[in-house]
Image (cartoon, rainbow, N blue to C red):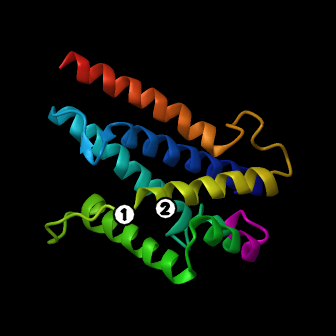
Amino acid sequence: MTRTNRLRRVGILCCHCLRNLAFRNAGWRKGAFLLTEQFWINANGNFLDIAVLEWCKLFADTHGKHFWSKVVTQKQDFNRGLLKTLDATQADFEAYVQEVKTYRDKFIAHLDDDEIMQISLLGFMRKSVSYLYDYILANEDDGNVFSDAPTNSGNHYSKYFKEGKAAYEELKQQA
């Protein structure tokens, strides 16, 4: 895979993760899901699961094709900036990676014996993906790879959060 293709695919994964997080988050108010029908509860859970899968490709699967270090040339600078953005230590981030991987492995990929699902802090997930996306746009796009892509992660997330919020509100009013 060429660097251009890999860079573009990492950007796509970032956008997919952020879109799914936005759609998932749009359905929640004060810790409660807005709808009661199983279809929408399941759809909202699927948004989370896809976001987790995409995030793991970017930050948890160190030997995977789309792991962040495969496209970032200044790895130490990126890592320092990521930890600063997250207001976390390397140990904090590694613990978070393990928590998300556990959720992925025990509840998405398999249904193991654990009976209680722990959903990681999604703000941490959003901030890390946003940082990666904005970083590669600013520092790694040496061939105009992202000419047709969102210009920043915040606007991308906000667009889909608003769309999701409007859809959930409309559904809630119809119920």
Query: Three-letter amino acid code at disc 1?
Result: Ser
Q: Is residue 62 left or right of residue 136?
A: left
Q: Is residue 50 left or right of residue 36?
A: right
Q: Residue furthest front?
A: 30
- 100 in the magenta segment: no
Q: Quadrant of the N terminus?
A: bottom right
Q: Residue at x 68, y 55 (%)?
A: 6
Q: Residue at x 25, y 62 (%)?
A: 107
Task: Provide the residue designation for mark 1.
Answer: 120
Q: How many marks?
A: 2
Is 122 in front, or is 70?
122
Compared to residue 72, the image places residue 43 above or below, namely: above
Q: Secondary structure at mark 1?
A: loop
- Crowd tier of the residue under label 2, counting other residues whose Cα lies within 10 Å: few below 14, some 14–19, many 20 or above: some
Is 61 in front, or is 59?
59
Compared to residue 101, the image places residue 91 above or below, namely: below
Q: Quadrant of residue 165?
A: top left
- The magenta stretch is 70-78
Q: Residue at x 39, y 43 (%)?
A: 25
Q: Secondary structure at mark 2?
A: helix
Compared to residue 75, the image places residue 43 above or below, namely: above
Task: Provide the residue designation for mark 2.
Answer: 124
Any part of residue 139 in sight: yes
Image coords of residue 101 (percent x, y): 39, 69
Any part of residue 140 in sight: no
